[in-house]
Amino acid sequence: MARCYLRTFGCSTNFSEGEIMQGLLAEAGIGQADAAETADVIVLNICTVKGDAVALRELRRLMDEHPQARYVIAGCVTEAIIPKARELAPDASFIDTHNISHIVEVVRSSLDGSPATALGHTTEVKLRMPRLRRNPMVGIIPIASGCMQGCSYCSVRLVKGGLMSYPEATIVAEARAALASGCAELWITSQDTANYWTDRGEGRLPSLLRRLCRLPDDFRIRVGMMNPTTLLPIADSLVESMAHPKVFRFLHLPVQSGSDTVLARMERRYTVAGFEDLVGLFRDRLPGLTLSTDIICGFPGETEEDFRASVDLVRRLRPEVLNISRFVPREGTQAAAMRMLPPSVARDRTRELTRVFGPIALATNRELVGREVTVLIDEEGKGGTRVGRTDGYRPVVVEGTHRPGSRVRVRIRRATCHDLRAF
């Protein structure tokens, strides 16, 4: 039996599509390899939203270590990366995010020594398909594909296309199937979750959440990343929906910069003050909220004053989670044509912001030390531990062999920058 090794990079939507591809391959009788060295074909499910470098570096490494394997490049495949990948793997096959239902044909063709391609936009709804879950406790449920925003630096629309919201009934059916298979968490996700249904009318994320919360099983919902511009029109309704006990009090809301000047060049269509007002609304009405936000360092034209504004914003907001990235130009975007800052400037600013945030993360976690909390065990940890999630989706490492999906009452005894410890 031919064996396939699949490795996924990027966002939760990419991981969902990786699970589907593995499910389709298993259903077709193609075995799953646990490691690249035992595979006949290697599928790299790549992310290029932040550039090609990571995907190409991983392909080069695998080709050096396993030159005899067949290769399939899947996921966020752009026109720009195909010739670069072919320089490294001339016989590679390609299948993009819109065509994952054809993974079996592409893999079989590769195994036969005939490189194949399955590229081009489709209107396929990537739900209600076979899947092998990466984490049996987590059901990843994309509610849409693509994006309606036009941020000057972002390649999502180039890769994923415009927004296509999935039917609510299909989403609910996927949720029922995930819960029936044993999942204890549902991750509601898309490129911009707050955008749901705005391609067909008014946003319906709050009503979708309310419908999912009416499902009878004992589970929790994590709402995925939302942009401030699309969140604003539904904010009051959404905060009510997120107050339901089945919804984690977790808000992933990228700000990207603390400077209105930079936000305007990014074409983000909100101000720093507007962002802070949104955060204040959710924090006031959802006590114990975990705020996750993102900042890009070194955007073209970012002055020292602009960067200081980002540092000051982080110090004011004190988010529990901060994703810091260095600006990378994406081919085909407006920002790629802008004048770049010296790489050393972007690097130094990224490092400084990381140093600033470390003590903030530790301090916000230490605020929970001594408290008793109930956590949902959702994954295995290191050294025989388990990892559970608080109502605010904070990770808590616990000792013992607690059953995945169970709820455990623990006392927080220690904190690090990254997690809480109940021992």
Image (cartoon, helix red, strand yellow):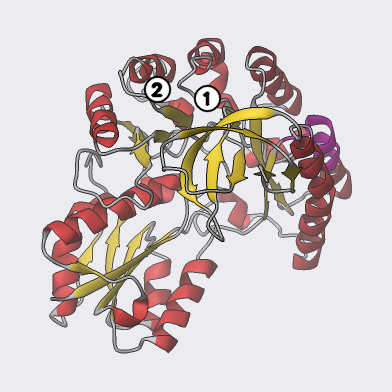
Residue 312 sits in quarter: top right
Q: Nearer the viewer, residue 345 or 175?
A: 175
- Tell whether label 2 touches label 1 (CB within 8 Å): yes
Mark closer to the chain start, 1 or 2: 2
Residue 200 among magenta residues:
no
Q: Residue at x 32, y 62 (%)?
A: 74
The CA distance from mark 1 to mark 2 is 9 Å
Can the viewer see residue 203? yes
Which residue is situated farthest in the front direction here? 400
Query: SS of the residue at dot 1?
Result: helix
Spot occupied by residue 61 in the image (x, y as percentages of width and height) = 47, 81
- The residue sitting at 36% across, 86% down in the picture is 66
Q: Position of residue 356 (x, y in %)?
A: 84, 48
Q: Secondary structure at mark 2?
A: loop
Q: How dense is the environment of label 1, judged by Cα within 10 Å: few (below 14), some, or many (20 and up)? A: some
Judge whether residue 317 is colored magenta: yes
Query: Magenta residues: mostly which secondary structure?
Result: helix
Q: Which mark is residue 204?
A: none
User: Does residue 294 lie above or below 381 as drawn?
Assistant: above
Between 415 and 18, the one nearer to me in the picture? 415
Q: Of residues 130 and 382, which is closer to you in this image?
A: 382
Q: Amino acid at mark 2?
A: Thr
Q: Which residues are magenta?
A: 309-319
Q: Which residue is mark 2?
A: 198
Mark number for residue 230?
1
Horizontal and vertical percent for residue 230? 52, 24
On the picture, is 378 further left or further right than 413? left
- Left or right, 65 with respect to 277, comes to left
Q: Position of residue 169 (x, y in %)?
A: 23, 22
Residue that appears at 21% across and 42% down: 124
Q: Amino acid at mark 1?
A: Thr
The image quarter containing residue 128 is top left
